[in-house]
Image (cartoon, rainbow, N blue to C red):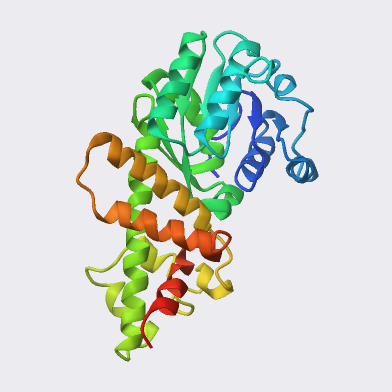
Amino acid sequence: MSETSGPGNLGHVAFLGLGHMGGPMAVNLVKAGYTVAGFDVVPAALDAARDHGVPTVATPAEAVNGADVVLTMFPGGQHVLSAYRGNGGQPGLLEVAAPDTMFLDCSTINVDEAREASALAVAAGHRAVDAPVSGGVVGAEAGTLTFMVGALPEDFDTVRPLLEVMGKRVVHCGDHGAGQAAKVCNNLILGVSMIAVSEAFVLGEKLGLTHQALFDVASAASGQCWALTTNCPVPGPVPTSPANRDYQPGFAGALMAKDLKLALNALQGTGVAARMGPLASEIYDTFAAEGGAGRDFSAIITDIRDKSAH
């Protein structure tokens, strides 16, 4: 956790979305001295947050009351936009928040949705930042996440101390939506590279290579990448990788399928002549549908192995 962390002029935080990622992030804010009002639609998530010292409230409006920053960590862009606008006759967060509130969305959503959410916030008299994260549940718990931030420069400067409580790396990627753009590009690389690393290990097995021998070569040669050296898809070479604990996530296959779908939307929307990205999206879609949704995304190697000729 950053030495520079601590409440500044955003000391009162409404934290909406206390799931596997949001819950630990909220805990770290409380530990750093922030005043947090947490809310989640899932009762178990509320209970878990309370058990770890996060004050919770009964409604989103109650959380937002008096908040300097409204931090959202939701499953998808439709949830962010619906919460901002309101639905079912309930007022939206933008309406109930005090003027000039900082709206900080840490969800992973489509770039276009992030830009729309920011535009709605600004039009309602607020400030907006998109700051999706990388680092998984382990990073959320340890306060070592990477934040990819889309914001006006002055808003980035304002929100940075708060983000540094929850992460060890905070990167200003550009204006509204740029954080999501960086996240989708990064995870496109990650998804494609994990498939390539997994295919290489299965090929190595067929050719008589041990996992350790292939790792020792590739990790110090041109095949080196994060999917190999940190999240190695076979047990042994990297003792901390999910492969050593029966592929417990980590970063679940369902989340990789979701993020690659976001990448696919961006590729199609921009007209990029991509071939690997769409194929990786299709592979992880199938993997998640066939039982891999709750396993670490590196378990794609088991799917490749099972479908290979014997």
Relative to the observer, which residue lies in front, 181 or 23? 181
Q: Is residue 61 visible?
A: yes
Looking at the picture, how far across and down is residue 105, in whole percent? 52, 30
Residue occupying image coordinates x 68% and y 32%: 33
Residue 195 vertical position relative to residue 103 in the rendered view, above or below: below
Image quarter where the N terminus lies is top right
Residue 97 vertical position relative to residue 180 in the rendered view, above or below: above
Q: Is residue 9 visible?
A: no
Left or right? Give the position of 34 relative to 245: right
Image quarter where the C terminus lies is bottom left
Residue occupying image coordinates x 38% and y 83%: 212
Identify the image quadrant of residue 219. Answer: bottom left
Identify the image quadrant of residue 221. Answer: bottom left
Looking at the picture, how far across and down is residue 230, in whole percent? 42, 65
Residue 207 vertical position relative to residue 225 in the rendered view, above or below: below
Report the label total: 0
Looking at the picture, how far across and down is residue 213, in whole percent? 33, 85
Left or right? Give the position of 107 relative to 272: right
Outermost residue toward the bottom in this view: 208
Residue occupying image coordinates x 57% and y 18%: 85
Looking at the picture, how far across and down is residue 281, in whole percent? 38, 54
Residue occupying image coordinates x 50% and y 26%: 159
